[in-house]
Image: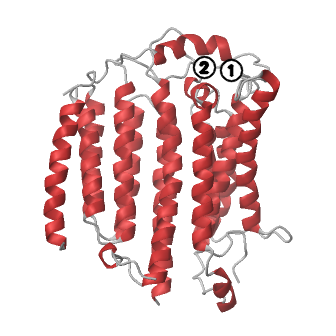
Amino acid sequence: MSVLAYLVSVWLFVVGIYGVVTSRHLVHLVICLAVAQSSTYVLLLGIGYRTGGQAPIFGDIPTSTPVVDPVVQSLTLTDVVVSATVSALLLALAVQAHRRFGSVDPDELNALRG
Amino acid sequence: MTALQATCLIVVAVLGALVVATRDPLRQAAVAGIFGLALAALFLSVQAPDVALSEMTVGTIVIPVLVLLAMAKIREHDE
Amino acid sequence: MSRRVRSVVALVALGALGTVLVIAVTGLEPFGHYPGPYGDVLAKVVPGERHTGQLVAATVFDYRGFDTLGEEMILFAAVCGAAALLRVRRRKREEAGTPARPAPSFATRATGAALVGPVIVFGAYVIANGHITPGGGFSGGVIVAGALVLAYAAGQVVRLRRVGSIALLEGAEALGAAGFLLLAVGGLIAAGALLKNFLPLGTSGLLLSAGTIPVGNVAVGIEVAGAVALVIAEFLEQALLEEPE
């Protein structure tokens, strides 16, 4: 039971990559990629957790209470917002691919056309 | 691991599989919004309020709006 | 290879990858037994050294500020790429005229108009108090951008006569990125090390404390708000702050 968090992270990653590989619509592909990215957030926060620890903010608790790890939280915090913007870039690519080739099916975008 | 954390983890796993299984992008945007909320609840249960705030705003505002706008642009180019 | 064969190959390969990952993951420390020294070091050192209780903000903007600098540049580059991709055919669309949009109902417009102001103020509050409470530049910036999305969804817009609205969002994003860079270089000039905390530290818990951390929060907040609003405005392709005819 103590590895449930890590197992869920592996499950999310595998499921996300399966969605990317068998996708039939570029926009569906981008959202499955976002699911695969969220697996890393779950893994990072799972590693940093301490049983009985509080949130790492000493606003109104004494500075000697045990807290969970703030480093992994800082990595995840910046990553959440930045990966949303990268998904926006991928969606712009999907829109542009539809404009140029008339289809959003990844299987039909397989030839390098001049 | 508390019962709350275990429940949140299982809900996140199920919703993740549901997001991938939904093939239509418009419906998938709604399910992705719910997935973002479940992730935010999970982050809160492991004592990470900053990350939960970011995930809540990004997962329910930015991602579904971007998907809907991308689908609108693809559709209007079809006409 | 056909789609069916590709599905089967993917299932087999991902099954193997999943097995290897599960074996790897069972070698980690059990969930809840955090072993590493860095969290404990930070918890002991930060309240005294930086006069702030927000360990995450101190890590993001001070101790690991270099990572944040890189993330800022990723954000900037991604938005530049999305804007470049979406602006290719804009001239033709402008000549063709914007398509008619159905007017939203009065309830939607009233709720949107009533909520835009409080949401912006709330976002600014989250940004400004990032070094005291949970939140900070990243979350607060997205909240402010969400207020602009609300303004569009409710059909309520603001007309700016001289300044082009897309130019305003671009300016905000560039200002935020430049602000963070200047802060980093300011540490180099004023105190001899890049990103060093060179402003007076003040007392913990006040709004003006912890040196460069609130300044970094504001810079990141402006940039994230500008970037997210710009990317959504590019998708909308009709300059968010323009009145519908």
Which residue is depicted at the point 48% across and 74% down? Answer: A95
In this figure, which residue is indicated by the disc labeled 1?
C205
User: Local crowd at mark 1 within 10 Å, few (<14), some, or many (≥20)?
Assistant: some
The x, y position of residue B76, in whole percent, is 50, 84
Residue C44 quadrant: top right
Q: Amino acid at mark 1?
A: Gly
The x, y position of residue B33, in whole percent, is: 41, 56
* Chain for numbered disc 2: C
Per the image, the residue denoted by label 2 is C53
Q: Residue at x 79, y 69 (%)?
A: C164
- Chain letter for the residue marked with disc 1 in the picture: C
**Residue type at numbered disc 2:** Gly
Nearest the viewer among A107 and A87 is: A107
Q: Earlier in the sequence, mark 1 or mark 2?
A: 2
Question: Residue at position x 18%, y 66% from top?
Answer: C6
Image quadrant containing the N terminus of chain C: bottom left
Mark 1: secondary structure: loop
- Nearer the observer: mark 1 or 2; the answer is 2
Residue C119 shows in the view: no
In this rendering, would A66 be left or right of C127? left
Q: Which of the 4 image quadrants contains residue C134?
A: top right
Residue C85 relative to residue C171: left or right: left
Q: Are marks 1 and 2 in contact (CB under 8 Å)?
A: yes
Q: Residues within 10 Å of mark 2 (few under 14, many from 20)?
A: many
Say if A93 sits above or below C34 in the image: below
Q: Name the side, left or right, on which A74 lies relative to B5.
A: right
Residue plotted at (40% across, 17% down): C36
